[in-house]
């Protein structure tokens, strides 16, 4: 009996002890990224902890990580996979169903149309025009159409994309999302004269929230116009983020059907159900009840940021710059065209839908 207990203890220690070095490494990088992300300059330029974590991870991954990989590999892989899913689940505590009520049916329609049109355009241009791999087009499309780096990371378990593909997709979010921070205040001033969108800061805030990539970038762009615009932008963005879960389920079903057809039979292939997406919705529903104190919710979101930052750091550590260089200019061109669509097409969608619901 004593021998069996000792064996089980040793097995447990061996199994989880090997994760510790990689978890520590990912955690240290995440801590540094979160600390940098709190700096005023970083916040004003929309540089979130997630973006900084993957950048720091890439730097270390292409310099010193090669020597640490034998020791840290298991923990880094755990961060990139398991902690990612847990982070997406806890992301639900940033949202409530009451957010939907604040933007109304018009806001929901705008977000849904921007999301579907942008992702559809990404698939067409990515696979037909630029001849990119389907997974690469999906990841870039998700980053542009839903919620930036978080959407790219959530898509990775569904499409089973390579680290390099994920990093390229995240980099496009960084590039064009950063441009948006400086461009949208200029567009706001132009809109005051052109009146394409409503002249109120709230109307332009909905436009920002429905078309800018990252939550942090939405906040930065909105605040540069005013608090009223920032509030509307964040609410519209949160509704867009909430669409991530059903989108994951639909995409998983479509991919499974495509595999079945490719296999030469009409039977449905095994559906890789992203269960974490359903738990994410459950977290949103629970948070909507308002049962938890504000301090507890704040602590959960801080912990969630740390988990997602660790996942991004792990992704960066396992990404090789040579693979990104091999991807070439096509992913950037695709993301650039999607950015143009988000600006022009997004404005058109906002204008038409707002007119219909006026």
Image (cartoon, rainbow, N blue to C red):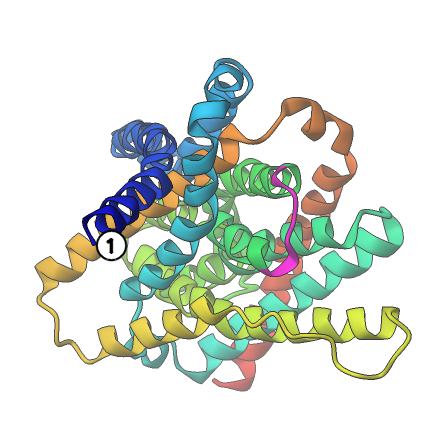
Residue 231 locus on image (x, y percent): 30, 60
Determine whether 71 is above or below 314 in the image. above
Q: Is residue 342 left or right of residue 123?
A: left
* Image quadrant containing the N terminus: bottom left
Residue 162 drawn in magenta: yes
Residue 102 lies in what quarter of the image?
A: bottom left
Of 100 and 15, nearer the camera is 15
Percent of width and height locating residue 303: 24, 49
Residue 92 location in percent, x, y? Answer: 33, 66
Relative to 97, does residue 343 appear above or below in the rendering? Answer: above
**Residue with the most extreme right position:** 264
- Seen at 52% across and 68% down, the residue is 274
The one nearer the camera, 171 or 210, is 171
Residue 287 spot, x, y in % from top left: 23, 73
Q: Nearer the viewer, residue 243 or 24?
A: 24
Question: Can you identify the residue that label 1 sits on?
Answer: 301
- Which residue shows up at 47% across the image and 49% down it? 81
């Amino acid at each position: 009996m004593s021998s069996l207990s000792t064996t089980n203890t040793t097995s447990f220690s061996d199994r989880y002890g090997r994760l510790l070095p990689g978890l520590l490494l990912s955690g240290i990088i995440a801590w540094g990224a979160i600390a940098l992300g709190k700096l005023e300059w970083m916040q004003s330029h929309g540089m979130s902890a997630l973006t900084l974590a993957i950048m720091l991870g890439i730097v270390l991954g292409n310099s010193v990580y090669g020597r640490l990989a034998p020791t840290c590999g298991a923990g880094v892989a755990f961060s990139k996979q398991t902690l990612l899913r847990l982070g997406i689940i806890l992301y639900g505590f940033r949202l409530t169903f009451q957010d939907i009520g604040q933007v109304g049916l018009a806001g929901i329609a705008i977000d849904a149309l921007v999301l579907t049109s942008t992702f559809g355009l990404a698939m067409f241009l990515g696979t037909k025009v630029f001849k990119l791999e389907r997974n690469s087009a999906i990841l870039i499309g998700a980053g542009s159409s839903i919620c930036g780096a978080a959407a790219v990371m959530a898509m990775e378990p569904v499409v089973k994309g390579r680290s390099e593909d994920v990093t390229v997709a995240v980099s496009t979010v960084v590039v064009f999302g950063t441009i948006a921070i400086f461009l949208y205040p200029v567009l706001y001033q132009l809109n005051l004269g052109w009146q394409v969108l409503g002249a109120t800061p709230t109307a332009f805030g909905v436009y920002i929230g429905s078309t800018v990539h990252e939550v942090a970038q939405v906040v930065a762009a909105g605040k540069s116009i005013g608090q009223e615009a920032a509030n509307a932008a964040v609410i519209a963005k949160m509704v867009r983020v909430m669409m991530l879960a059903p989108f994951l389920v639909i995409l998983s079903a479509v991919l499974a059907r495509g595999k079945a057809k490719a296999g030469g039979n009409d039977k449905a292939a095994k559906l890789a159900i992203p269960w974490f997406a359903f738990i994410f919705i459950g977290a949103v529903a629970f948070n909507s009840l308002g049962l938890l104190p504000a301090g507890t919710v704040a602590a959960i979101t801080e912990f969630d940021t740390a988990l997602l930052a660790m996942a991004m750091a792990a992704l960066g550590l396992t990404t090789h710059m040579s693979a990104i260089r091999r991807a070439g200019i096509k992913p950037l061109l695709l993301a650039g065209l999607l950015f143009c669509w988000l600006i022009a097409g997004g404005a058109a969608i906002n204008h038409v839908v707002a007119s219909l619901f006026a």
